[in-house]
Amino acid sequence: MKTRILFVCHGNICRSPMAEFVMKDLVQKAGLADKFHIESAATSTEEIGNEVYPPARRKLAEHGISCKGKTARQITRADYDRFDLLIGMDSHNLYNMNRICGGDPEGKIHALMDYTAHPSEVADPWYTGNFEATWQDVLLGCKGILKALNP
């Protein structure tokens, strides 16, 4: 049975698709791709249908990771049942994920950086312009998730 992970941020064009494709890359390199199903989504409707933001796409490409074909979609209440883990990037995402999903009775909603030694928020590079800092946080968080799920 596959572990199903949904990464979530505000618009699904920067942080969550970076996490989606970093995690896919990590599980592929670990020989575990067949054990995971990984997607990403937004809490807002602002970017639905749009591709990954070009600077985020370039940051992934710098590390040999493609996100070709990914377009933004919004999280739905049904996603709560479809996924084992729903991973948000910041407290606003977590609040909205709980609101959209009708709460978190099964304890599936978590913050990405809670899987690291430095729990914090993943800064939104749409506003900060610092895609390298976001890359570092996303990579650290995804490695933490992989370690937690595959010790």
Image (cartoon, grey):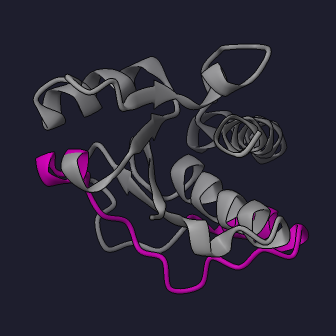
Q: Quadrant of residue 132?
A: top right
Q: Is residue 77 magenta?
A: yes
Q: In this view, does 108 lie to the left or right of 105?
A: right
Which residue reaches farthest bottom? Answer: 69
Q: Quadrant of the C terminus?
A: top right
Q: Does the magenta stretch include residue 142?
A: no
List x then y, in percent, for residue 79. 23, 52
Can residue 56 be seen? no
Residue at position x 33%, y 51% in the image? 83
Residue at position x 29%, y 21% in the image? 95
Up the image or down, 133 lies above or below 57; here it is above
List x then y, in percent, for residue 128. 67, 33
Residue at position x 62%, y 52% in the image? 19
Q: Quadrant of residue 72?
A: bottom left
Up the image or down, 104 lies above or below 83; here it is above
109 or 105: nearer the viewer: 105
Residue at position x 37%, y 29% in the image? 109
List x then y, in percent, for residue 37. 48, 66
Which stretch did the figure color magenta? 53-80
10 or 111: nearer the viewer: 111
Q: Quadrant of the N terminus?
A: bottom left
Q: Quadrant of residue 40?
A: bottom left
Can residue 69 be seen? yes
